[in-house]
């Protein structure tokens, strides 16, 4: 319980689901050593951390930010630019982190102080505007960021796929640099999520919830709401930047499409809402569901689309086309906001609380 | 406050002209920097045309927010829908579009614009009933619901029209420019300015000269009081929402013709611009929205000419500067 900050998932089904997901992620390199499965698993880890940090904002303070990908992108680009500029060394990784994380926190502080004093709507609009300006900036300053092409870079020796650590047969699988990178991503994401769980269960987290429920009252009780909100904003930004750095390390690349675009912001929003706002655990489930849907639902939809086309149905082939998977997740998203705003996790948790 | 006797005339409302002068000042201030008169005039016309188009798109959003405290993050979807619907008319009748006759061109443009407005207005009805009605008064859910609507609408457009960019050529009579001395003024920009001006004057007339407009303005200022007087403000709001969506559709076809292409991502790109305009203008203010649109367009055009690198973030800088000066926008109309 210590490691979960005394806030275990309050439902047996949910607990089992989480254990299955985490065990599958931990064992992916051994069970499914293919490149695609590894990619999906790494993305689930990275996005679970980003979504958890976004949940700190959306679920616990009730403020909608559209600038979260900006922080994610800052982390990615910091690593990419450092490794590209300084060559593949651990010092470069450290430099990237040492520049990226504080930069993200500083920017979050600036935006927060500028716009958190007023209403949620205003904050949402300002963050949207700032994030879009940042995206344009990143794709235009090509001497620094590589422009639309982004930056590819070499990893330090130890993390390269060619580096064989244990030549054969840990259960028939060779352990190489790629496996090691995966476990770094996995462990760092897990650490960040546990850290966030600690934060939301601390007195500080309780104040955030109080602000979400009734900001005026929290202020009347003597809490400096702007301080708390800005602090939460900076924390979330730093975790997002950290996850961005992991993403860059995994992809060996950072570019506008993989780390900054507005569609990633929408993906994050979908994951946090479908998983469940204000639960942190929802981040893991949301990220896992979303990534599995993104990578495997499409195959299913292709089959359905072809079947519909063969049957000569109008419109359906287009709607079921594999590229339209986001349409169905969007509908699920609206249904989630409408029917169970606390998502998959909140639903199970609430049922457990009622019966228990 | 001085005491008023019952017989005194009511004090005139205080007019605030300073923000209205800003675009003029900006235009005059940049003139010496740009140097040549002809490029200054070209840039100014371009800004006015772009400002007019942005205003048409943004006007609905600001009214909807002012009246009902609803911010529609899916507003961009109506812009895209308007543009796509216009292609339904403009592409099959390509012969008329290509014909070298202003009347034939207008005969195809007018129904296209009307259809675009009608369809996006009707879509507004559906969106208001299905997505917004259940979450009145809950900002967080409103933002999420309308963002979800944006995702679904964009994907549905891809599903119906395919993901490729649809080219949409300008009608022949609106191509090219008038040449006055050494100044070239694109014809289409004049049309855009004209439409923007008509929309602005139309909205002002409706708001200031009709009973419905009176109710809308009263509702923006104090919703509960209007309700208490027995008016169904929900129905009024539905009308405003549909009109705003229709205007966004009109803006969509104008923008599509301006760029001569249609793509579902245009709504997303323009949403940011529209939001900046609405924030600058003061949420709920039509006049502020008009001035904000002109300012944004001017900063983009002049900035792009003078300092191309800075132009990328010029909108943000403009917004920060305006909010430093007036934290609630140029004209703050709502008490919220």
Image: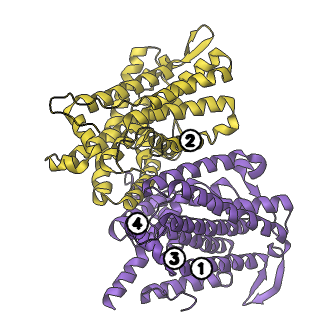
**Residue A249 vs residue A280, the one in the foreground:** A280
Q: What is the x, y in percent for residue A130?
A: 57, 50
Q: Is residue A153 visible?
A: no
Residues tagged by mark 1 and mark 4 found on one chain of the structure: yes
Neighbor class of circle 1 (other Cα within 10 Å; few <14, some 14-19, many 20+) is some
**Chain that bears disc 3:** A
Secondary element at tag 4: helix
Q: Residue A129 carries which label?
A: none
**Chain that bears disc 4:** A
Q: What is the x, y in percent for residue A299?
A: 53, 66
> Which quadrant of the figure has residue B214?
top left
- Label 1 with label 3: CB-CB less than 8 Å: no
| Depicted B271 relative to depicted A316: above or below | above
Observer-side mark, 1 or 2, equals 2
Residue matched to label 4: A215
Real-space Cα separation, disc 1 to disc 3, in angstroms = 13 Å
Chain B tint in image: yellow
Neighbor class of circle 2 (other Cα within 10 Å; few <14, some 14-19, many 20+) is few
Q: Earlier in the sequence, mark 1 or mark 3?
A: 1
Residue matched to label 2: B321
Residue matched to label 1: A195
Real-space Cα separation, disc 1 to disc 2, in angstroms = 38 Å
Residues tagged by mark 2 and mark 3 found on one chain of the structure: no
| Depicted B277 relative to depicted A233: above or below | above
Q: What is the x, y in percent for residue B333?
A: 36, 41
Chain A tint in image: purple
Real-space Cα separation, disc 1 to disc 4, in angstroms = 25 Å
Q: Earlier in the sequence, mark 1 or mark 4?
A: 1
**Chain that bears disc 2:** B
Residue matched to label 3: A204
> Which quadrant of the figure has residue A87?
bottom right
């Amino acid at each position: 319980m210590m490691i979960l900050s005394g806030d275990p998932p309050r439902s047996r089904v949910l607990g089992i689901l989480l254990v299955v997901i985490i065990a599958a992620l931990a064992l992916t390199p051994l069970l499914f050593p293919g490149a695609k499965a590894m990619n999906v698993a790494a993305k689930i880890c990275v996005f679970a951390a980003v979504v958890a940090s976004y949940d700190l904002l959306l679920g616990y303070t009730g403020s909608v930010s559209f600038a979260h990908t900006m922080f994610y992108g800052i982390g990615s680009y910091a690593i990419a630019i450092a490794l590209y500029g300084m060559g593949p060394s651990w010092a470069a990784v450290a430099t990237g982190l040492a520049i990226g994380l504080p930069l993200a926190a500083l920017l979050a502080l600036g935006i927060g102080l500028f716009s958190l004093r007023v209403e949620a709507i205003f904050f949402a609009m300002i963050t949207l505007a700032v994030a879009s300006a940042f995206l344009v900036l990143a794709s235009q300053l090509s001497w620094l960021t590589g422009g639309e092409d982004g930056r590819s870079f070499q990893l330090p020796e130890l993390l390269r796929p060619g580096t064989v650590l244990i030549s054969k047969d840990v259960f028939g699988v060779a352990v190489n640099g790629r496996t090691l990178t995966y476990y770094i991503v996995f462990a760092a994401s897990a650490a960040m999520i546990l850290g966030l769980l600690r934060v939301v269960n601390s007195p500080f987290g309780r104040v955030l919830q109080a602000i979400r429920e009734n900001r005026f009252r929290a202020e009347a009780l003597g809490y400096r709401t702007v301080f708390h909100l800005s602090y939460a904003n900076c924390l979330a930004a730093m975790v997002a930047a950290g996850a961005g750095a992991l993403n860059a390390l995994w992809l060996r690349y950072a570019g506008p499409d993989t780390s900054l675009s507005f569609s990633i912001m929408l993906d994050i929003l979908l994951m946090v809402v479908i998983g469940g706002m204000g639960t942190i655990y929802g981040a893991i489930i949301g990220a896992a569901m979303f990534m599995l849907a993104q990578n495997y639902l499409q195959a299913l939809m292709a089959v359905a689309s072809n079947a519909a086309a063969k049957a000569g149905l109008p419109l359906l082939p287009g709607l079921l086309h594999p590229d339209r998977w986001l349409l169905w997740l969007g509908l699920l998203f609206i249904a989630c906001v409408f029917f169970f705003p606390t998502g998959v996790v909140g639903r199970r948790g609430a049922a457990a609380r009622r019966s228990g | 406050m001085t005491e008023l006797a019952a017989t005194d005339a009511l004090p005139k409302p205080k007019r605030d002209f300073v923000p209205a002068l800003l675009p003029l000042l900006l235009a005059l201030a940049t003139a010496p920097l740009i140097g040549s008169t002809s490029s200054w005039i070209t840039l100014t016309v371009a800004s006015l045309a772009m400002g007019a188009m942005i205003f048409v798109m943004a006007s609905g959003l600001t009214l909807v927010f002012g009246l009902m405290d609803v911010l529609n993050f899916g507003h961009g979807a109506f812009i895209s829908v308007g543009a796509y619907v216009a292609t339904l008319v403009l592409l099959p009748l390509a012969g008329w579009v290509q014909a070298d006759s202003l009347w034939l061109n207008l005969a195809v443009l007018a129904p296209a614009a009307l259809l675009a407005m009608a369809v996006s207005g009707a879509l507004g009805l559906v969106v208001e009933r299905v997505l917004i009605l259940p979450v009145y008064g809950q900002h967080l859910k409103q933002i999420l619901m309308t963002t979800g609507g944006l995702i679904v609408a964009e994907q549905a457009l891809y599903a119906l029209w395919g993901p490729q960019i649809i080219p949409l050529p300008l009608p022949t009579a609106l191509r090219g420019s008038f040449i006055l001395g050494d100044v070239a003024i694109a014809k289409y920009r004049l049309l855009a300015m004209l439409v923007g001006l008509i929309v602005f004057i139309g909205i002002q007339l409706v708001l200031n000269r009709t009973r419905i407009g009176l109710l809308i303005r009263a509702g923006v200022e104090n919703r509960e009081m209007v309700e208490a007087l027995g008016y169904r403000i929900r129905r009024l709001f539905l009308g405003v929402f549909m009109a705003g969506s229709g205007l966004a559709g009109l803006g969509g076809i104008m923008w599509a013709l301006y760029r001569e292409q249609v793509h579902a991502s245009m709504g997303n790109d323009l949403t940011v611009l529209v939001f900046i305009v609405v924030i600058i203008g003061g949420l709920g203010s039509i006049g502020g929205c008009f001035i904000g649109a002109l300012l944004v367009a001017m900063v983009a055009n002049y900035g792009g000419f003078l300092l191309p690198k800075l132009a990328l973030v010029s909108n943000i800088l403009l917004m920060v500067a305006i909010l430093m000066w007036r934290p609630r926008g140029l004209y703050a109309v709502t008490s919220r």
